[in-house]
Image (spheres, helix red, strand yellow):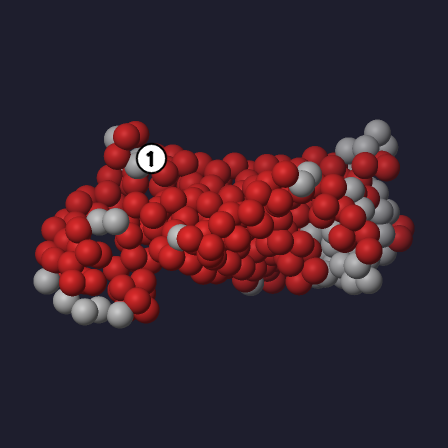
């Protein structure tokens, strides 16, 4: 009964938060850009066909490194492929990795953070010490070492490595949120009427603890895309024939003086994508944090 009252009482403020978000230019613009990038990743052929043939694999060495020309607004890459089509198709790998990493980190954080925050005791001590190990280890060095040793470098491999070093931050936030919710009055009331542990966790604790983790996850999406591109740029992430912005930047660094367009256009798309997701996460954080309203 207490939880039902809480939910109904909080429903109206939540609707008000969403209305407030929609009125914020930063949220509206960043959401629109993020949706376009996601659509580009889902159906790149629709966007790649706006100029030229739209096939990133259709190449002619005679066009190698040529600057922008009519029908080819971004020019050609070193293999003579249309750079615009390759940049558009490059969004797919970045967004796919961002989704896989976000889902993986969130799942681990909710499970381990929820167990540590609710049961406390030895479970909290064990999970917290594991998190401390990851916090004390240089993540970039660890990711490079693991990817160097990996036999394959595809989206799943890169995602797994990013998840491995990214979940502790979310799990710590989830643990703190669960600690606060587990001592609330409506959880005590649920225990008093005989609700079991699983019912309390799934119905009361986790849904009311998930907000801070969701906001932090939104902030991390841009960082995940940037991290994937950085690892690929360093030569340990995705590798050709994969099409990604990181692969394009890795190749372009050798030809920056003679063909700067190879570096400029993928960089613009990468920067706009990361910036839009960061702005989106900031807007969500400001809306859901009462101290910032």
177 or 80: nearer the viewer = 177
The quarter of the rendered structure image containing the N terminus is: bottom left
Q: Is residue 137 left or right of residue 147?
A: left
242 or 109: nearer the viewer = 109
Q: Quadrant of residue 197?
A: bottom left
Position in image of residue 22 (x %, y %): 29, 42
Q: Is residue 112 above or below residue 64?
A: below
Secondary element at tag 1: helix
Q: Residue at the front extreme?
A: 122
Residue linked to disc 1: 286
The quarter of the rendered structure image containing the C terminus is: top left
For the point 58% across and 50% down, which residue is it? Answer: 130
For the point 31% across and 62% down, which residue is it? Answer: 201
Categorize mark 1 by other alpha carbons within 10 Å: few (<14), some (14-19), many (20+). Answer: some
Q: Is residue 204 left or right of residue 166?
A: left
Say whether residue 12 is visible. yes
For the point 85% across and 56% down, which residue is it? Answer: 60
Position in image of residue 279 (x %, y %): 44, 36
Position in image of residue 239 (x %, y %): 79, 55
Q: Is residue 62 left or right of residue 44?
A: right
Q: Quadrant of residue 252?
A: top right
For the point 42% across and 41% down, which residue is it? Answer: 280
47 or 186: nearer the viewer = 186
Numbered marks: total: 1
Say whether residue 69 is visible. no
Q: Residue at the right extreme?
A: 62
């Amino acid at each position: 009964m207490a939880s039902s009252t809480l939910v109904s009482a909080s429903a109206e403020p939540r609707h008000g938060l969403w209305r407030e978000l929609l009125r914020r230019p930063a949220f509206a613009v960043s959401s629109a850009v993020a949706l376009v990038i996601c659509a580009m990743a889902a159906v790149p052929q629709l966007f790649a066909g706006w100029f030229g043939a739209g096939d990133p694999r259709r190449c002619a060495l005679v066009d190698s490194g040529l600057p922008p020309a009519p029908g080819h607004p971004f020019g050609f890459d070193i293999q003579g492929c249309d750079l615009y089509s390759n940049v558009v198709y490059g969004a797919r790998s970045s967004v796919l990795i961002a989704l896989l990493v976000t889902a993986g980190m969130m799942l681990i954080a909710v499970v381990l953070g929820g167990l540590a925050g609710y049961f406390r005791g030895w479970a909290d001590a064990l999970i917290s010490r594991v998190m401390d190990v990851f916090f004390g280890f240089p993540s970039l060095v660890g990711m490079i070492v693991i990817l160097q040793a990996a036999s394959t470098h595809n989206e799943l491999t890169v995602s797994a490595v990013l998840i491995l070093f990214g979940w502790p931050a979310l799990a710590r936030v989830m643990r703190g949120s669960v600690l606060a919710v587990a001592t609330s009055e409506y959880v005590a009331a649920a225990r008093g009427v005989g609700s079991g542990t699983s019912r309390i966790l799934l119905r009361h604790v986790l849904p009311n603890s998930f907000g801070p983790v969701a906001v932090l996850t939104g902030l991390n999406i841009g960082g995940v895309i940037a991290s994937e591109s950085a690892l690929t740029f360093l030569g340990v992430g995705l590798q050709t024939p994969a099409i990604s912005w990181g692969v394009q930047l890795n190749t372009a660094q050798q030809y920056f003086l003679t063909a700067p367009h190879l570096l400029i256009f993928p960089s613009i798309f990468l920067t706009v994508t990361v910036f839009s997701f960061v702005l989106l996460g900031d807007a969500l954080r400001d809306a859901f944090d009462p101290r910032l309203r």
